[in-house]
Image (cartoon, rainbow, N blue to C red):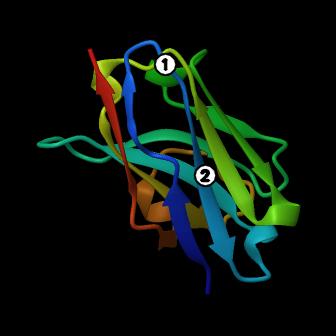
Amino acid sequence: QVQLVESGGRLVQAGGSLRLSCTASGRTFSTYAVGWFRQAPGKEREFVAAISFSGGNTGYADFVKGRFTISRDNAKNAVYLQMNSLKPEDTAVYYCAGSGRYAYTGAQSDAYDYWGQGTQVTVSS
């Protein structure tokens, strides 16, 4: 069992930066791939980025390439999402999710077994 907790979301102006954190309980966290998803009001949840268990492979949605960077520190049981050049359309609740498919970096939400409660990111124009 893995429990995930997101943090770091807040109100930021357009063009600003945020770093979200996803911290996990459980000794097996380093064997899980982790993804970030987001859901804006009135919209479906969408994939943002993912990282394999070792950090050696990553995947990104096209709309965040060049702006967001996912990384992990297994010694701290943490995965991070560095978000730069934020836009109002990045406003959403951001969720991290763990997948037992340790090398998975894809966008299919049903490939992820554990989900956090989310953290709100609001980008003002």
> Which of 59/22 is in front?
22
Residue drawn at the location 56% of the way across and 70% of the way down: 4
Quadrant into which the C terminus falls: top left
In x, y percent, where is residue 45? 30, 47
Residue at point 37% right, 20% down? 13
Label 2 Cα neighbours within 10 Å, binned few <14 / some 14-19 / many ≥20? many
Which one is in front, 79 or 53?
A: 79
SS label for mark 1: loop
Instruction: Judge from the rendering whether residue 39 lies leftward or rightward of residue 30; answer left or right.
Output: left
* Residue 5 in view of the camera: yes
The amino acid sitting under disc 2 is Ser
Task: Give the labeled residue for mark 1.
Answer: 16
Task: Give the amino acid at mark 1.
Answer: Gly
Sequence order check: which comes first, mark 2 or mark 1? 1
Image: 76 above or below 19: below
Q: Quadrant of residue 3?
A: bottom right
**Residue at coordinates 60% horizontally, 58% vertically from top-left?**
22
Q: Position of residue 40 (x, y in %)?
A: 24, 40
30 in relation to 41, above or below:
below
According to the picture, the residue beneath numbered tag 2 turns out to be 21
Left or right: residue 88 versus residue 37 is left
Determine whether label 2 and label 1 are within 8 Å by CB. no
From the image, state whether disc 2 or disc 1 is nearer to you: 1
Can the viewer see residue 100? no
Task: Identify the image quadrant of residue 27.
Answer: bottom right
